[in-house]
């Protein structure tokens, strides 16, 4: 073997190492945690700042790394082919192709990428200075290549936007939380809280409000002492007042304001002018997003709003607590009435009141019933069946068996729900 042979072998080995470096760097930098890198940069890490700068120009980074990777692979294959031709003649091309395919796949692709994906943050910090220098040199070529790619794709009707992501930031966070939950790093409550926070922009006030049929309100035309007694007997801090009809909300009484007025009147409830104690009602559309309504509550320093539909008719009420519960789950204090309507049966079925919100049921039982077309369980059954079912009618959809247990006029008031897998298992046992 001549000296030239060993020099070429050394060059091939170097090309494989360089190719592995570029492949591993691409994997690590695209998988690195942005949150961790920003935290390290905030704490003064220069390497983390380099990683963030590289990731901010992802197209340029990936283009440069692919150029370096392909140059190394092509050079290594060309050098290997020249050696195998000298040794084996025309058959050397086939031998070179087989040998370099194995070497490049194992040592320049799978091995470095597996190493990088196992610890992407540490790998990214280690390679950042070298990658930054290479991107600085090859960056203009990578930019030109990206522009050519965009032009070619545009000819086929594919528009590639700058820094385009297939997933929105919310979807990426939601997906990450789901993966962490499956791996055991996130408990169910933490996943639900993050999901509830992300859902605020997608949900509307109508999805969480207390419907008018379940809203406690007081007739302002009654004597003051009766009004005071009704408010004191209620478990709520804020109670709306109506006149003439429940659609005519004229004020909202805060229990603390009423108690203060009662004290000033010498505990003579009949002497209180309840409308002077009440505050002006705040009306909000039912289509307002929960994120906007939360900001409005905080901006106005208010906790209560009356919800109206597009015709201005009262549809229900929403409180700050209703929105916060979408994030943290049910909030209860010593005056709250325990939420009723969901009862787990020994056979694995669940007896549910028709008015129970689908989101609450999903959160409590970790189910995945859709809530886009209906807010309550009864509404879901009516939407799916396109009718108002009779008692004892049964339906199967969304992997569940729904049995109507009770109906009051046009309202489904109670249902039995059982996962379809449990129903099928019971049938198999009977047979």
Image: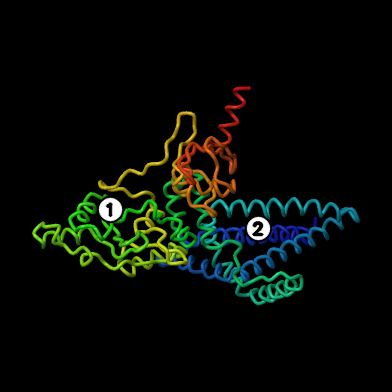
Between disc 1 and disc 2, the foreground one is: 1
Residue 375 place in picture, x, y as percent: 48, 52
Q: Which mark is residue 236?
A: 1
Name the image quarter holding the C terminus: top right
Q: What residue do we see at 47% from left, 54% from top?
A: 195
**Element marked by disc 2:** helix
Q: Which mark is residue 20?
A: 2
Residue 282 place in picture, x, y as percent: 34, 67
Q: Would you identify the image quadrant in which residue 77 lies?
A: bottom right
Q: Work out whether residue 32 or residue 135 is closer to the camera in this orientation and state it.
A: 32
Q: Earlier in the sequence, mark 1 or mark 2?
A: 2
Relative to 91, is 169 above or below?
below
Residue 209 place in picture, x, y as percent: 41, 56
Q: Work out whether residue 12 or residue 164 is closer to the camera in this orientation and state it.
A: 164
Q: How far apart are labels 1 and 2 at the CA level?
A: 66 Å
Q: Residues within 10 Å of mark 2 (few under 14, many from 20)?
A: many
**Element marked by disc 1:** loop
Q: What residue do we see at 30% from left, 65% from top?
A: 250
Q: Work out whether residue 172 or residue 218 is closer to the camera in this orientation and state it.
A: 218
Residue 83 place in picture, x, y as percent: 82, 58
């Amino acid at each position: 073997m001549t000296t030239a042979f060993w020099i070429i072998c050394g060059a091939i080995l170097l090309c494989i190492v360089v190719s592995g470096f570029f492949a591993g760097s691409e994997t690590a930098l695209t998988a690195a945690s942005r949150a961790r890198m920003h935290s390290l940069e905030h704490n003064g890490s220069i390497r983390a700042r380099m990683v963030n700068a590289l990731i901010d120009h992802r197209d340029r980074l990936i283009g440069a790394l692919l150029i370096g990777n392909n140059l190394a692979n092509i050079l290594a294959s060309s050098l290997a082919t020249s050696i195998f031709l000298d040794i084996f003649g025309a058959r050397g091309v086939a031998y070179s192709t087989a040998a370099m395919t194995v070497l490049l796949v194992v040592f320049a692709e799978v091995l470095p990428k597996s190493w990088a994906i196992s610890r992407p943050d540490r790998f990214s910090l280690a390679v950042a200075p070298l990658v930054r220098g290479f991107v600085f040199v090859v960056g203009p070529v990578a930019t030109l290549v990206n522009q050519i790619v965009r032009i070619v794709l545009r000819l086929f009707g594919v528009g590639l936007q700058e820094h385009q992501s297939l997933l929105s930031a919310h979807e990426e966070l939601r997906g990450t939380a789901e993966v962490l939950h499956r791996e055991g790093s996130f408990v169910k409550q933490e996943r639900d809280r993050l999901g509830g926070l992300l859902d605020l922009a997608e949900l509307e006030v109508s999805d969480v409000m207390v419907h008018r049929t379940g809203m406690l309100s007081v007739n302002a035309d009654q004597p003051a002492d009766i009004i005071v007694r009704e408010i004191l007997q209620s478990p709520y801090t804020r109670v709306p007042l109506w006149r003439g009809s429940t659609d005519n909300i004229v004020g909202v009484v805060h229990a603390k304001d009423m108690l203060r007025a009662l004290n000033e009147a010498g505990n003579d409830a009949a002497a209180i002018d309840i409308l002077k104690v009440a505050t002006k009602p705040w009306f909000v559309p039912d289509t307002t997003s929960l994120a906007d309504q939360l900001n409005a509550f905080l901006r106005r320093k208010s906790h209560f709003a009356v919800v109206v539909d597009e015709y201005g008719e009262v549809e229900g009420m929403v409180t700050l607590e209703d929105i916060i519960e979408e994030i943290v789950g049910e909030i209860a204090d010593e005056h709250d009435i325990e939420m009723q309507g969901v009862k787990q049966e020994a056979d694995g079925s669940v007896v549910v009141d028709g008015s129970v919100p689908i989101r609450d049921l999903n959160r409590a039982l970790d189910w995945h019933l859709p809530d886009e077309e209906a807010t309550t369980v009864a509404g879901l059954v009516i939407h799916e069946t396109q009718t108002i079912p009779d008692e004892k009618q049964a339906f199967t959809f969304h992997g569940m068996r729904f049995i109507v247990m009770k109906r009051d006029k046009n309202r489904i008031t109670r249902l039995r729900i059982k996962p379809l897998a449990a129903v099928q298992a019971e049938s198999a046992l009977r047979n």
